[in-house]
Amino acid sequence: MPTSTVFRNVPALFNSLHSTDRLLIAFWCLLSLISLFFHSLIPGWPFIIMANFAAALLVCGLASVALSSGSRILRCVHDWAAFLLVIFTYKQVYFMIGPIHQGRDYDALLIAIDRLLFRINASELLSGLANPCLTEVLQIAYSLFYVFFVAIGLELYLRQDLSQFRYFRFTVVYGFFISYIGYFFLPAVGPRFALHDFSKTDIELPGLFLTPALRWFVNIFESIPSGVSNAIALANAQRDVFPSGHTMMTVIAVILAFEYKLRIRYYVFCAGMLLILATVYLRYHYLIDLVAGAFLVFPCLLTANRIYAVFRRNASADP
């Protein structure tokens, strides 16, 4: 294809990207720049940049084909792909934070803040209330985190009012990226490592039927292999404690579910409140993490609409 034709197609390709596509690509560019800047500390920085480039090409190709083909299936895949790409971005951050901070964690600082503000270590206090039934309920609630966004998005999608779905999708991805940026500043592993013996979690917080499998899934998702020593588990754990993305994004999900008057809004609210309690009871977060996550809800929602307006400009997929 002649070079002039390629350049003429660039505006059309850019217009085929919806607002969330553009947000994803912009954030991947930011992460690539951070990787390049800290290349002396990040061993896999070339792979991070190449992975981002490949992901951007995938998004551009999917957007272009979905728009030009008119296929409902491809359009549906394009509409929902962003939710999976958020997970790709989350795992990428994992390979950057530890090396940038050269293995330093800030759990001691977060514990000190909790003691200063609240006079307690909340996970230790809640250990006295440990009960297998309660653990089972809260582990299930904690594991429903990503289900919230799929359920809300699905109800909006089936309403055929795609404008609300598009804004919801953008706001969710935008909110996750705000929390990811926070992880870069104060990486920490959480109370299950810093205040408790991680290897004794199943003994000290036993559940009933689903807890072992759900806990295993959470650990694997957070890069913690099963059946390893405390030291290996600690070395592999995600540094994603502060701010609490679970708290921030759950509150955003609840607010938007009520704003859109969804049928599932009360279920999201009840399960969401249990999830936030579970973050401390199950030893994933400190109280200050929850406070920071809740605080970030407001700047996220206050700025999302303006940022969305900028990113959706001339987007054929976001009419």
Image: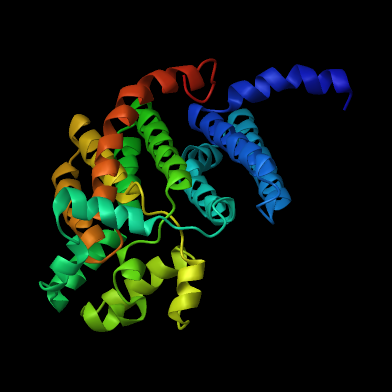
Q: Is residue 272 visible?
A: no
Residue 21, image x and y in percent? 54, 33
Picture residue at 48% right of the left edge, 17% below the top: 310
Q: Is residue 44 above or below residue 33?
A: below
Q: Is residue 99 visible?
A: yes
Residue 245, image x and y in percent? 34, 47
Picture residue at 29% right of the left edge, 80% below the top: 202
Which of the 4 image quarters holds residue 155? Answer: top left
Residue 156, image x and y in percent? 31, 36
Q: In this view of the protein, which residue sits in the foreground, 314 or 66? A: 314
Which of the 4 image quarters holds residue 177? Answer: top left
Q: Is residue 39 above or below residue 261?
A: below
Picture residue at 29% right of the left edge, 43% below the top: 293
Residue 238, image x and y in percent? 46, 60
Picture residue at 48% right of the left edge, 37% below the top: 79
Q: Is residue 90 above or below residue 15?
A: below
Q: In the visual, does 47 lie left or right of 145? A: right
Q: In this view of the protein, which residue sits in the foreground, 76 or 216? A: 216
Q: In the visual, does 117 lie left or right of 30? A: left
